[in-house]
Amino acid sequence: MATSGRRTRTRNGRPLLDRRLIAAEALRVIDADGLEQLSMRRLGAELGVEGMAIYHHFHNKAELLDGVLELLLEELEVPPEGEGTAIERLRRTFEATRALAIRHPHAFLLLPTRRFNTVRALEYYERLLGLFRDAGFDARESARFFRLLAGYVSGAGLAEIGSRAQQPDATPAKLETFSDPERFPLVTAIVPELRVRNLDAIFAFGMDVIFDAMSAHLRAGAARSTRTAPRL
Amino acid sequence: MATSGRRTRTRNGRPLLDRRLIAAEALRVIDADGLEQLSMRRLGAELGVEGMAIYHHFHNKAELLDGVLELLLEELEVPPEGEGTAIERLRRTFEATRALAIRHPHAFLLLPTRRFNTVRALEYYERLLGLFRDAGFDARESARFFRLLAGYVSGAGLAEIGSRAQQPDATPAKLETFSDPERFPLVTAIVPELRVRNLDAIFAFGMDVIFDAMSAHLRAGAARSTRTAPRL
DNA sequence: ACCTGAACACCGTTCAAGT
DNA sequence: ACCTGAACACCGTTCAAGT
């Protein structure tokens, strides 16, 4: 090959910037100090460059955040064929989404809030929908279970992030240590249930409910073969 | 009564500021132009005041956002006793959360991301947990179904916001009109399913799955009466 | 008590200029 | 092609000062 990528390390010691390098550093900043602490100037400083240099690689900050989202999606690789049934791989895929929330509590918000605009995001979607198809779901059923599963893991992911870390700002009342049995008996009673050591079981419970329904749906569909009448 | 609240309209024509008035104007700004367009100076201008005046009523912006969240929670009133069974009221309550996402697409993000720090938020939690108890769930079951339901409605709410509105920033590829059957056949096939007119049915489908599981859980619990052995 | 005005340390983004 | 430096129009927050 003619142009192999061996000529790194220009720019007095540091590698030349590229989109991936910048996005990776942005993810590090977000992991360390939170989404709102990511600024172009701060990111430039971390990279040993003026903040404005980043605009040579991304049109604006939104596009940079799409780049960070792409890195998150890379950590969500869909298990390839052969590693269990389609349903099992589907479950592992969505469990990976929750693991991502725990691993990147600050960056995770990008997943449920930013649209999947990039090619890599579309590729992820395509592989995921392939699992629904392989499991036996048509487009309409895939859409419905996809939104149920994706909604659950992203919403529950955000909730777990709140349960695990205390955000520094705002008013008091950390729920973990909350206790006011006089005014709020039911809230007080549920607090011990939401301790971190119970969160795995709570998440798995929700997944069980959804995957039980998916299995039942597939069995029912197999029983009546083809006869689906859309009802609007 | 001695000090009735009749003396509004000081400050040359405009009512004196208070927390509720400021939070309501903040919600209007967010509804109109998005969360990131809310600034203390902009909000002050809308209220006919310098932005710094707001700090007399809220310690910082985070506390102001808690105030906005309180207003959102007011729109989520839990149906009182007598209006159907506890399960029915539970379902209506979470349907109201989705309706809130559609009504306040920009402000809705506050619900799954901000902790419920205020007294009003705790009151909302308490009433909601009262519905789970009335339906027949103990603290542990309430925690599990609460996270499943709340996770689903907030995650699906965020997804619906994305499906309904196009965010102005970032890269192209609006999913609603996406079509690339060569490279992304499955994504292309699912796009028509996610059109706005199908979103009601998709949301209801997920709710059916969860509430069917809740009903089954209650029936099973009624059958075996009391015998729950924690397994951890 | 309630609000103003100036100040501080930041933002995202544009653009001409450097190499 | 890749980065710098200055500039513009903003931020959140603090604090002394006004009424």
Image: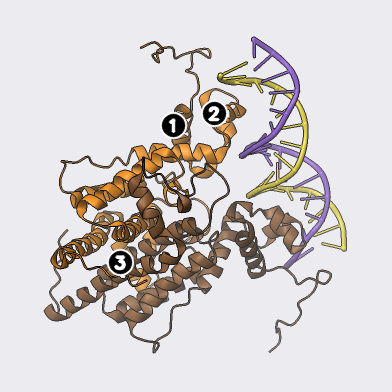
Chain colours: A orange, B brown, C purple, D yellow
Quarter of the rendering occupied by the C terminus of chain B = bottom left
Could you say which quadrant of the image residue C11 lies in?
Answer: top right
Q: Quadrant of residue A104?
A: top left
Camera-side mark, 2 or 3: 2
Which element is circle 3 on? helix
Q: Amino acid at mark 3?
A: Ala
Chain letter for the residue marked with disc 1 in the picture: A
Q: Secondary structure at mark 2?
A: loop
**Image location of residue B126, percent across then percent down:** 40, 74
Chain under callout 3: B
Q: Callout 2: few (<14), some (14-19), or many (20+) C-alpha neighbours within 10 Å?
A: some
Q: Which residue is mark 1?
A: A24
- Residue A171 visible: yes
Q: Are marks 1 and 3 on the same chain?
A: no
Q: Nearer the viewer, residue B90 or A3?
A: A3
Measuring from the top left, give residue D17's x and y in whole percent: 84, 52
The chain containing the residue under callout 2 comes to: A
Please state which of residues A175 and A49 is positioned toward the viewer in this rendering.
Answer: A49
The residue pinned by badge 2 equals A57
Identified at 52% across, 59% down, the residue is A171
Q: Amino acid at mark 2?
A: His
Please tell me how crowded label 3 is: few (under 14), some (14-19), or many (20+) other residues with Cα within 10 Å: many
Image side of residue D17 versus residue B114, left or right: right
Please state which of residues B125 and A65 is positioned toward the viewer in this rendering.
A65
Task: Provide the residue designation for mark 3.
Answer: B143
Q: Write the residue at 35% across / 12% down.
A: A1
Three-letter code for the amino acid on which mark 1 is drawn: Ala
How far apart marks 2 and 3 lie (CA) works out to: 46 Å
